[in-house]
Amino acid sequence: MKATLIIIQNDTDHAEAKSLVEKLMRSSDSAHLARMTAQARLIEAYERTRWLGRMPSLSELLTYLMEQHGLSRADLVPLLGTASRVSEVMNGKRELSMSMIRKLRERFHISADLLIPRTQPHGVAA
């Protein structure tokens, strides 16, 4: 039996691969489950190379979440306050308030730890 897997080379391939895994997850066929496992491993490998073992910046994280949920910057206005505030956050000129963190966490079902700025230990240069 031949199984087709999506080789992931860009964000479009990544989205298609994740969609395929979601579809295969609904199956009880052992061949589909094996294909799902293989595709999930390809997704994981791509994500590891994309993030290069580092935490993504807030802008990268928000861009990724918007892509995954089919949202635009305008869709972040109810979460962050105003269009200019969204722009400031996305450009790294403003950190998130606790209220913004709470809204983003609830909207995207992610850990607040991903949204809270990481500080360097005292005396350690970045």
Image (cartoon, rainbow, N blue to C red):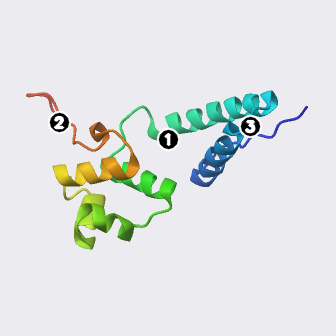
Left or right, 100 with reference to 17: left
Q: What residue type is labelled 3?
A: Ser
Front label number (3 vs 2): 3
Q: Can residue 124 be seen in this snapshot?
A: yes
Judge the density around disc 2: few (<14), some (14-19), many (≥20) Cα neighbours within 10 Å: few
Q: What residue type is labelled 1?
A: Arg
Q: Is residue 97 above or below residue 44?
A: below
Q: Nearer the viewer, residue 107 or 1?
A: 107
Left or right, 57 with reference to 100: right
Left or right, 98 with reference to 112: left
Mark earlier in primary sequence (1, 3):
3
The residue under label 3 is 27
Judged from the image, the secondary structure of the residue bearing numbered disc 1 is helix
- Rendered image: mark on residue 119: 2
Seen as rendered, the residue at the extreme right is 1
| Residue drawn at 31 percent across, 52 percent down | 104
Front label number (1 vs 3): 3
Residue 10, position in %: x, y?
A: 60, 50
Residue 16, position in %: x, y?
A: 65, 51
Q: Nearer the viewer, residue 113 or 118?
A: 113
- Rendered image: mark on residue 50: 1
